[in-house]
Image: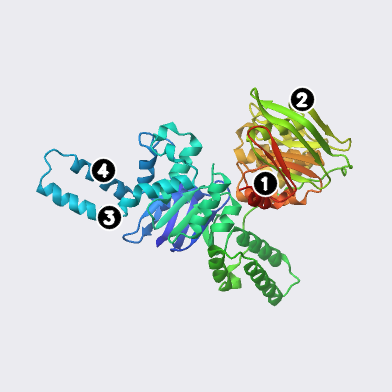
């Protein structure tokens, strides 16, 4: 068990946490959520002992071991991959090295023999004889093949290192796991394997992630970091979000009696619990939800951006036709004879070769040229494009956000423009800040404001969830679902792909493609 008592943290005059008291118990996974800058990763650093709190303490039960997902890509460059994983259990790795030193001695004596026997006993207790095979299995499950296991870490690329560090964190059956964005740079197979691993894990898992699908599958509790407090809620992310939204709606409804509100909340809990899957984690959550009391459901103080794409005119029957479309990226063909027709109601998720997809999207947005083939939009179509790299819109731009937005608005009045910025949480003085000092998430929200101004009926999104917090991702998800026009998009957010797309097009590495009218999960079932 991991216990947090009277924890507070201040940076200068800023209070990040105050009087936090929590218990993390074995057999449960705790998802840490909060707006960007709320202190989620900082809280994990305190739990791991990397950062000292201003007041309070963190207690790990005696004899228990904590493992933390490392973030420094260069810290293990002088070690090979297999050793790096085994170092996830520091004592075991230390024993292995001490044994090697003892047995390598030319003057091995009786005292060394006694010491070696003690080390062998502890080595066996820590399952040392299975260490290399266990580490190898973890690596292979995370798509690191055997021929890389004895390579030096310095020889791996960034994505491969992330997988090795994840294997290191999971190695040796730790009692407490602390994971900061563990699904970053993982493919779908590796994420699915990790979900199954954590669902069956017997210890305590504390995780920060922007992947809602992952949080929904593995979490039994949500810890919400908001306004200096950290509150614990039963259930996964969807239950926290939907129940807090319902509680807020009921709180604002002055006409309903308290008894009616209680019944509505109870009905929601029963519906959510009944819809749970049959997985071990879902069954565990169901037991917790069955015990929940209405007072536990509270409205969130979180502010969500309001994203709403409203087309000025409805699209006609002719939307988009591609035929024998070919394109290249940096001299290499990444799209080869692509052909498809966009029909009314199509919201198409593109998966596969990211260079190919980005190249296709930029050409369709009018920012590049194809090698050959046809790409023809209908005469009623108006396009708006969200590029993966938005730096050209903000670099060396000293305009205030109001003046930045004026560049794209038919109505240049300040009140009109402030209305759109306010929806993206830029109100008051925030709307006067310079465009060149924005964070990654703020730039993305400005791009959404720009897109809303244009009232297009055909939207193209290239990785729109990058840099966003969960609140903005959820708001975008709702907006894309509600949009009555057509959408082409690519995303690493599985929940977004699954809930928005009714058609999947995969661009393969050789430029060929697969086109299927199905949901994202259905496509994975057919092709994994």
Alpha-carbon distance for marks 3 and 4? 15 Å
Q: Earlier in the sequence, mark 3 or mark 4?
A: 4
| In the image: residue 412, left or right of residue 234 | right
Q: Nearer the viewer, residue 300 or 480?
A: 480
Q: Which numbered disc flags the more N-terminal residue, 2 or 3? A: 3
Identify the secondary structure beneath mark 4.
helix
- In the displayed structure, 286 sits above or below 37; it is below
Please give the name of the residue rendered at 47% of the width and 48% of the height, measured from the top-left corner. Answer: 42
Element type where label 3 sits in the image: helix
Marks 2 and 4: which is nearer the front? Answer: 2
Q: Which mark is residue 124?
A: 3
How many marks can you see? 4
Q: Residue sitting at 70 percent across and 52 percent down?
A: 499
Q: Of residues 527 and 107, which is closer to you in this image?
A: 527
- CA distance separating discs 2 and 3: 65 Å
Residue 97 is tagged as 4
Q: Which residue is mark 1?
A: 425
Give the number of the mark in front: 3 or 4: 3
Q: Nearer the viewer, mark 1 or mark 4?
A: 4
Q: Which mark is residue 372?
A: 2
**Residue closer to the observer: 463 or 150:** 150
The earlier-in-sequence mark between 2 and 4 is 4
Q: Is residue 71 left or right of residue 392?
A: left
91 horizontally vs 280: left or right: left
* SS at badge 2: strand
Give the mark, 1 or 3, whose residue is nearer the N terminus.
3
What x and y, as percent, mark residue 278? 59, 65
- Whether tag 2 and tag 4 are in contact, CB under 8 A, the answer is no
In the rendered image, the vertical position of residue 180 relative to residue 266, given as above or below: above
Q: Residues within 10 Å of mark 2 (few under 14, many from 20)?
A: few
């Amino acid at each position: 068990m991991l216990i947090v008592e009277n924890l507070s943290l201040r940076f200068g005059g800023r209070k990040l946490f105050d009087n936090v008291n929590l218990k993390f118990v074995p057999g449960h996974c705790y998802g840490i959520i909060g707006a960007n800058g709320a202190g989620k990763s900082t809280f994990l650093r305190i739990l791991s002992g990397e950062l000292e709190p201003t007041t309070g303490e963190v207690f790990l039960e005696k004899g228990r071991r904590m493992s933390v997902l490392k973030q420094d890509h260069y810290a293990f460059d002088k070690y090979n991959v297999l050793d790096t994983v085994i170092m996830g259990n520091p004592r075991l790795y230390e024993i292995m090295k001490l044994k090697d030193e003892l047995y390598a001695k030319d003057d091995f004596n009786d005292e060394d023999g006694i010491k070696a026997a003690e080390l062998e006993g502890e080595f066996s207790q820590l399952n040392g004889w299975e260490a290399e095979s266990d580490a190898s299995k973890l690596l292979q499950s995370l798509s690191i093949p055997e021929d890389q296991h004895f390579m030096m870490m310095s020889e791996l690329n960034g994505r491969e290192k992330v997988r090795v560090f994840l294997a290191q964190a999971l190695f040796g059956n730790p009692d407490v796991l602390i994971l900061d964005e563990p699904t970053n740079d993982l493919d779908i197979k590796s994420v699915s394997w990790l979900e199954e691993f954590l669902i069956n894990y017997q210890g305590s898992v504390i995780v920060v992630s922007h992947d809602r699908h992952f949080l929904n599958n593995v979490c039994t509790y949500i810890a919400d970091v908001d306004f200096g407090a950290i509150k614990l809620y039963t259930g996964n992310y969807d239950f926290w979000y939907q129940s807090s939204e319902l509680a807020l709606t009921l709180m604002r409804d002055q006409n309903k009696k308290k008894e009616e509100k209680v019944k509505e909340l109870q009905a929601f809990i029963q519906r959510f619990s009944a819809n749970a899957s049959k997985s071990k984690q879902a069954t565990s959550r169901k037991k917790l939800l069955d015990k929940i009391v209405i007072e536990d459901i509270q409205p969130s103080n979180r502010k969500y951006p309001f994203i709403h794409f409203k087309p000025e005119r409805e699209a006609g029957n002719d939307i988009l036709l591609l035929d024998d479309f070919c394109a290249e990226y940096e001299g290499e063909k990444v799209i080869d004879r692509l052909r498809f027709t966009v029909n009314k109601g199509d919201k198409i998720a593109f998966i596969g070769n990211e260079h190919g997809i980005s190249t296709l999207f930029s050409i369709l947005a009018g920012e590049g040229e194809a090698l050959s083939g046809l790409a023809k939009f209908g005469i009623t179509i108006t396009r708006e494009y969200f590029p993966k790299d938005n730096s050209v819109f903000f670099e060396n731009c000293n305009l205030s956000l109001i003046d930045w937005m004026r560049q794209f608005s038919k109505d240049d009045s300040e009140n009109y423009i402030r209305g759109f910025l306010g929806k993206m949480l830029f109100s008051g003085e925030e709307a006067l800040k310079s465009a060149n000092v924005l964070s990654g998430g703020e730039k993305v929200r400005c791009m959404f404001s720009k897109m809303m101004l244009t009232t297009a009926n055909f939207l193209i999104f290239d990785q729109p969830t990058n840099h966003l917090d969960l609140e903005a991702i959820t708001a975008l998800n709702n907006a894309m679902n509600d949009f009555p026009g057509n959408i082409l998009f690519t995303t690493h957010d599985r929940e977004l792909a699954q809930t928005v797309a009714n058609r999947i097009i995969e661009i393969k590495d050789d430029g060929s493609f697969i086109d299927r009218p199905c949901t994202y999960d259905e496509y994975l079932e057919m092709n994994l």
